Amino acid sequence: MIIAILGTGRMGKGLVKTFYQAYPQDVLFSSRDQQRAQDVLSELKLNCTAVDMDEALKADVIIPTFWFRDLIPWAIAHKEQLKGKIVIDITNPFNEDFSDFTTSYDTSSAEELQKVIPESVVVGAFKNTFWVVFDAPVLQGIKSDVFVTSQSEAARKTIIELLKLLPFRVLDAGLLKNNRTIERMTLLSSEMARKAGSHPRISYNLWGLEHEGLTS
Ligand SMILES: NC(=O)c1ccc[n+]([C@@H]2O[C@H](COP(=O)([O-])OP(=O)(O)OC[C@H]3O[C@@H](n4cnc5c(N)ncnc54)[C@H](OP(=O)(O)O)[C@@H]3O)[C@@H](O)[C@H]2O)c1
């Protein structure tokens, strides 16, 4: 399975490092500027390929690492190329000063993305994983959780299997509507971490789960 990570920002860098460690042969990296993607790969000392956006969109699993305001126009523009693909959505729809969300309580960015690309399968993941956590996802023996959501149980299982080689605990978190909560959990953890002085090294671990899979 070929995985394409799009965007050279903080999450793009964290994800490409982490996926490359698990799947060095299967990762593509892209950007609006292919040279920037190549420079980031050199900076991170990763021997994987920077490709243009058209090439990246041939992958089986696409991970755009954009802000929500840029994600939806991008998804609409690339709707045809995204058909039949799994698109992993990592976004939290923050407003300009990060004090709240631009979406209302009856939706989430994952659901809004699925609406504009109905012939692709959206899988929510990494929404609570702050960028520095990729460097060390285990704290005092406790792994950071990644909540995986999708309308498609098959896609959820595929991505859970894919992520199992990554150094996180990966949980089946059910349908996309659960992102109304999961995304807002990021807002909460961000505020609490700032007060505690530990921002941005913050993530969730749902205590008490004996098995990794939650039923949907
Ligand atoms: N930061 C976190 O800790 C964190 C945690 C969980 C989820 N997230 C989510 O991850 C997403 C990215 O966060 P980030 O912190 O990685 O942001 P960032 O550092 O600002 O990176 C965003 C990247 O999006 C790409 N991009 C594509 N189209 C764009 C456009 N039209 N305008 C501007 N940039 C565009 C750019 O990469 P190119 O220039 O290479 O195209 C840019 O570097 C957000 O939706 C956020 O909610 C972030």
Image (tube, helix red, strand yellow):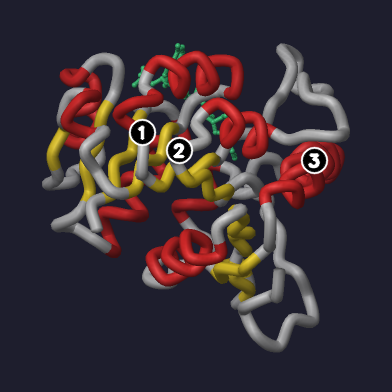
Bin the neighbour count of mark 2 within 10 Å (Cα to Cα): few under 14, some 14-19, many 20 and up: some
Residue under the point 85% across and 34% down? 106
Residue under the point 75% across and 69% down? 206
> Could you tell which of marks 2 and 3 lies nearer the N-terminus?
2
Q: Are marks 2 and 1 in contact (CB under 8 Å)?
A: yes
Q: Are marks 2 and 3 in contact (CB under 8 Å)?
A: no
- On screen, residue 35 versus residue 44, left or right, reads left
Relative height, residue 123 to residue 40 (above, below): below
> Could you tell which of marks 2 and 1 lies nearer the N-terminus?
1
Q: Which residue is mark 1?
A: 82
Relative height, residue 176 to residue 69 (above, below): below
Bin the neighbour count of mark 3 within 10 Å (Cα to Cα): few under 14, some 14-19, many 20 and up: many
**Secondary structure of the residue carrying numbered label 3:** helix
Residue 116 placed where, x, y %? 55, 26
Tell us which disc is closer to us: 3 or 1: 1
Query: Which residue is nearer to you in this view: 119 or 144?
Result: 119
Which amino acid type is shown beneath numbered disc 2? Glu
Identify the image quadrant of the N terminus.
bottom left
**Secondary structure of the residue carrying numbered label 1:** helix
**Secondary structure of the residue carrying numbered label 2:** loop
Query: Which residue is nearer to you in this view: 122 or 7?
Result: 122
Tell us which disc is closer to us: 2 or 1: 2
Per the model, the C-alpha gap separating discs 2 and 3 is 27 Å
Q: Which residue is mark 2?
A: 119
Per the model, the C-alpha gap separating discs 2 and 1 is 8 Å
Which amino acid type is shown beneath numbered disc 1? Leu
Q: Which residue is mark 3?
A: 184
